Image: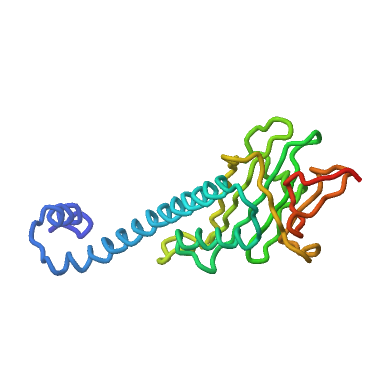
Amino acid sequence: MQSPPSRLPSALRRFAEDEFAALSIEAAFLLPVLCLLYVAGYQFFDSYRRETQMIKANFAVADMLSRRVSLVTPADLDGLQRVYETMTFSTDASYMRFTEVRRGANGMEVIWSYATDGQPGMTTERLQGYLNQIPRLDLNERVTLVESYTYDAPFFSVGLKDRIVDRVTPISQRYAARLAFAPGNGQENNGSVTGNNTDCGTNNTILIDGQLIVGAGNCTES
């Protein structure tokens, strides 16, 4: 009579060669695994789809702004944010920042900036962290940075975490050398609006239609 340890290999061999099965039992084991794999695959691919959707929407907004030849106000830029949110289905979950930068004698500098939803505008100091995303510019050449920041949360918990999808698109104006930005009156202490008078140097800036236009070169000798 064989001892239990000596009978173990033959028992395992018979179990491996056994072709009898019950479909309902196998389904009970495999269906949860298949469902888990399907949900995980769907979530990973959907995350990539969402990110691609946000990148395309950001570029679409940048392209719209690059065609602008008339005056730009914060209300116009807020409208572009709503266009972005409509394209990405991210209402109340995103904000944008629009910045015109120029390469001066001392490096890149911010001409004007506006951020939606009360977020901080771009400054020349903060701009130094974005230099690797700005193409090489000639002296006095300008480019507009269109940034989007969107909160994205996965539907299913498959190891992906909530995240902020950020995108920066630098784009040049198509029909004009610069954008004329009117921040409006009483914006001196608004951290969402940044503007300087580097266009005018030590000269005075004149008003156009009663508004201070940043980046339009509307200067007169003092």
Residue 108 percent across, percent down from the top left: 74, 39
Residue at image location 74% in from the left, 51% down from the top? 214
Relative to 191, residue 65 above or below? above
Residue 60 percent across, percent down from the top left: 49, 50
Q: In the visual, does 47 lie left or right of 67? A: left
Residue farthest to the right, as pictured: 222
Residue 144 percent across, percent down from the top left: 63, 45
Q: Quadrant of residue 200?
A: top right
Q: In the visual, does 144 lie left or right of 187? A: left
**Nearer the observer, 222 or 113:** 222
Residue at image location 57% in from the left, 57% down from the top? 149
Image quadrant in which the N terminus is located: bottom left
Residue at image location 11% in from the left, 52% down from the top? 17
Colouring method of the image? rainbow
Q: In the visual, does 144 lie left or right of 40? A: right
Residue 146 percent across, percent down from the top left: 60, 50
Residue farthest to the front, as pictured: 209
Relative to 9, residue 82 above or below? below
**Nearer the observer, 75 or 121:** 75
Residue at image location 19% in from the left, 58% down from the top? 3
